Image: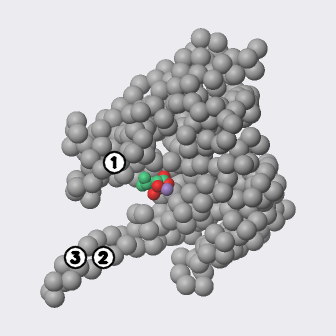
Amino acid sequence: MATHNLLMLPGDGIGPEVMAEVERLIAFFNKRGPAKFETSSDLVGGAAIDKHGVPVTDEAMAKAGQADAVLFGSVGGPKWDKVAYDIRPEAGLLRLRKDLDLFANLRPAICYPALAEASSLKRELIEGLDIMILRELTGGVYFGEPKEMVTLENGQQRAVDTQLYTTHEVERIAKVAFDLARVRRKKVHMAAKWNVMRTGVLWQQVTAAVHKSYAPEIAYEPILADNCAMQLVKNPKQFDVVVCDNLFGDILSDEAAMMTGSLGMLPSASLGAPDAKTGKRKALYEPVHGSAPDIAGQGLANPIATIGSFGMALRYSLGMVKEAELIDKAIANVLGQGLRTGDIMQPNMRKVGTTEMGRAIETELARLAG
Ligand code: IPM
Ligand code: MN
C-alpha cells in the first residue's frame, strides 16, 4: 500500500478545529485503505510566534519541503496585531508559498445544489456554478521590492509596494490555466488592468502568446479585472477558468467563494512546478477562509473548506482521484440531508457544529465507499 507523508500546519483561530476533522478522515483512510498516511505536525502563524518568536521555523520549512503535501489551517488573530510586520502570522504562510515556489493557486468555486439558496445571489445565477479562479501566488505586489515604509523629512510617512512580474512568471501560470481548461469547459479569461498597469500589459501579451503557441483550441479572453469583478456577480456562469495575478486573485476568489454560499466552503491548492525527474509537485492545501477569531474555540466553524482542501490533496498530489470524488460526493450528500454549520444555516435546516459536520461527512464517506 502506498504511504503518503503529510505535514499538518493547523495554525491559529479555527485552524486546529477544522483540521481535526481532516485528521478524522485520515484515520478513516488509514483503517480502510487504499493508502496509508503518515502525518507530522508543526506550528505556524501566531502559535509559532508564541513558541519560537517567528511565524514559521526553518525546521518546519524543511519538513514542508519534504512532505508529499502540506495541509494548512489558518493564521492570525487580534492577539498578534501588534507584532513586528516582518514576523506577523501571515508572514509564515507567505514564506511557505514563496520558499516552496507554490506559484499556482487553484481556487475552485462550486455551488453545491443544496446551497443554491444560501448564496446572496439569485438561485438561477449560481445553480450548477463551477468556476476555477487560478491565482498567481509567488509574485506581484505581495513580494515585489521595494516594499517599505519610510519617514520623510517633513514627518510624513511614505509607503511603497511594488507590483512586479517577469515573462517566465506569467508564462508558467498561463500554461496551468490552459491545462486546467483543457479538462474542463475549455475557456480561459485572463483578468488584469492593462489599461493602467505595465504589469497588466505584460500579462496580456504573454497570456495571448501562450494561448497561440500552447493552446489555440481553448477559448481565451482578456478581461479588465474591475469588469471581471462585476461580471462575476452579474453572470458568473459565463466563466470557466479565470487566471490573474496575486492581488486580483486574492480579491476575486473571496468574491467567488461568497457566491457559493459562504467563505467556509472554498478549498484551495497551491502547487509548484513538477520536478524534472519525478514529476512530483510541491504542494500546500488550505481553506480560502481565515482564522475567524470571533468564533474560534467554540466548535462552530465550518470544516468543509478544509475537508475539501484535503480532497484536493488526494486529487492533485496523491493520485487518489476516486477518493477525492467520494469526499466531494459525501459533502454534497450531507448538505443534501440538511446539515448546516452557522455560516450556511437556512430555514428548516439542522444546525450542527464542526465535529458533527465532520462526523457526518465521515459516515457518508464510509457509506459511499461501501
Ligand atoms: C488568502 C489570504 C492570505 C492572502 C493572507 C492571510 C495573507 O487572504 O490566502 O487569500 O492574502 O493571500
Ligand atoms: Mn484572501
Crowding near the residue tagged with mark 3, few <14, some 14–19, many ≥20 C-alpha atoms within 10 Å: few
Q: Which residue is mark 1?
A: 77
Proximity of marks 1 and 2: CB atoms separated by less than 8 Å: no
Proximity of marks 3 and 1: CB atoms separated by less than 8 Å: no
Q: What SS does tag 1 mark?
A: loop
**Quadrant (top left, top right, bottom left, bottom right) of the C terminus:** top right
Q: Amino acid at mark 3?
A: Val
Image vertical order of residue 59 relative to residue 148, above or below: above
**In this rendering, would 113 be left or right of 58?**
right
Which one is in front, 292 or 37? Answer: 292
Q: Residue furthest right?
A: 217
Which one is in front, 357 or 144? Answer: 357
**In this rendering, would 245 be left or right of 89?**
right
Queried on whether the Cβ of the residue with tag 1 lies below 8 angstroms from ligand 1, the answer reads: no
Q: What SS does tag 3 mark?
A: strand
- Relative image position of residue 330 (x, y in whole percent): 70, 28
Q: Quadrant of residue 63?
A: top left
Which one is in front, 197 or 260? Answer: 260
Label whose residue precedes the other's in the sequence (2 or 3): 3
**Quadrant (top left, top right, bottom left, bottom right) of the N terminus:** top right
Q: Which residue is mark 2?
A: 159
- Relative image position of residue 338 (x, y in whole percent): 70, 32
Q: Residue at x 69, y 65 (%)?
A: 232
- Relative image position of residue 181 (x, y in whole percent): 76, 55
Q: Amino acid at mark 2?
A: Ala
Q: Which residue is mark 3?
A: 150
